[in-house]
Each structure stands twice: as C-alpha cells, then as structure tokens.
C-alpha cells in the first residue's frame, strides 16, 4: 500500500486521520469544485493583454465563491477530527462531483442528454474555461508570459 494508506490498515477506519493526505485531498477537490463553478459564470470579456484593468465581479459571485471557500475550509477542519471512514466518504463524493461536472461540460455529452450548450461557452467549453482561468488568475498569466505552459 502507498505510505499515505498504511494507517488505514493498521488503525482502521473508525479513528481520526493520523496523516493529512485525506483531509488535504478533500480540500483540494472541494476548492476545485468551487473554482470550476466560479470560472464558468458568464462575465464581461476583458482582454488582459491590451488592458491591465480587472473588472470586479458582481457581489453575488464573490459571495458564493467566499462561501464555497469557507465551507470547504470548515469541512477540512472537521475532517481532522472525524473518523477516516467519513473523510473517505466525503472525498469520494467530492471527486465524483468534480468528475461529473467536468463530464457534463463536454458538448457531446450535453447533446446526448439534451442539455443545451451554454451561450458563453459555445462548442469549446474547456478552451473557454482555460482562457477564463488565465484571465482571472495572475499566476497563470505569469506562467504563460514566462513560457511555462509548454507551448
């Protein structure tokens, strides 16, 4: 077994996590869900190459994102004290939610399930998601400008 799972075999699932692998994985997957929803919200288009002005998001977007971060931080804190079985359940549920969200974004899946395409994403939602992330996060713009993106 991998080193992060050895305590599951020796201690069982009814004790609190003795390492941070499961809680940190839960936090990362939960925050990925929050950021994915945040990035998919339609907003005004801004060309950051031409303009350094960042248009602030409306307060409902900021509030829902902050509540998502707060909720995931709370779950992370509680996952340090609850049995590993519950943390493992939360983690599988969160990863399932993330995978389902990414799958439903695919245009072929949306067409086969008769779900309309979102006007702000068109036929290339993953490309739009990447462009939105690059425009929203300074670290991604820095990586792209320093040619760390592999292009």
Image: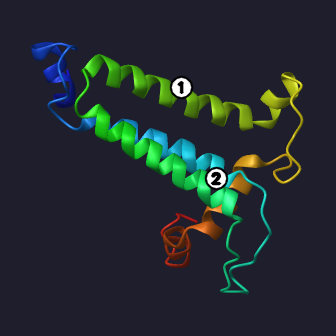
Q: Quadrant of residue 25?
A: top left
Q: Are marks 1 and 2 in contact (CB under 8 Å)?
A: no
Secondary structure state at the residue bearing disc 1: helix
Relative image position of residue 82 (x, y in whole percent): 26, 25
Cα gap from disc 1 to disc 2, whole angstroms:
18 Å
Is residue 65 in view?
A: yes
Relative image position of residue 65 (x, y in whole percent): 57, 53
Q: Quadrant of residue 6?
A: top left
User: Which comes before the other along the chain, label 1 or label 2?
Assistant: 2
Write down the residue under mark 1.
Answer: 96
Relative image position of residue 63 (x, y in whole percent): 60, 56
Write down the residue under mark 2.
Answer: 38
Q: In this view, does 63 lie to the left or right of 10?
A: right
Relative image position of residue 148 (x, y in whole percent): 48, 69
Q: What label does residue 104 carry, if any?
A: none
Q: Is residue 37 above or below residue 108?
A: below
Badge count: 2
The structure residue drawn at horizontal position 45% and vertical position 49%, both measured from the top left corner, is 70
Q: In this view, does 113 lie to the left or right of 50?
A: right
Q: Is residue 8 left or right of residue 89?
A: left
Secondary structure state at the residue bearing disc 2: helix
Q: In which quarter of the image is the C terminus?
A: bottom right
Is residue 24 in view?
A: no
Q: Is residue 2 above or below residue 123?
A: above
Which callout, 1 or 2, points to the residue nearer the camera? 2
């Amino acid at each position: 077994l991998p080193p992060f799972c050895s305590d599951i075999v020796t201690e069982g699932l009814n004790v609190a996590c003795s390492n941070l692998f499961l809680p940190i994985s839960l936090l990362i997957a939960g925050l990925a869900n929050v950021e994915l929803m945040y990035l998919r919200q339609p907003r005004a288009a801004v060309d950051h190459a031409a303009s350094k002005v960042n248009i602030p998001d409306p307060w409902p977007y900021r509030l829902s994102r902050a509540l998502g971060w707060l909720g995931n931080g709370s779950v992370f804190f509680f996952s340090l004290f609850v049995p590993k079985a519950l943390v493992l359940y939360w983690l599988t549920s969160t990863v399932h939610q993330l995978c389902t969200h990414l799958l439903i974004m695919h245009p072929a899946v949306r067409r086969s399930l008769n779900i309309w395409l979102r006007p702000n994403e068109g036929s290339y939602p993953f490309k739009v998601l990447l462009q939105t992330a690059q425009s929203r996060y300074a670290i991604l713009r820095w990586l792209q400008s320093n040619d760390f993106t592999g292009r």
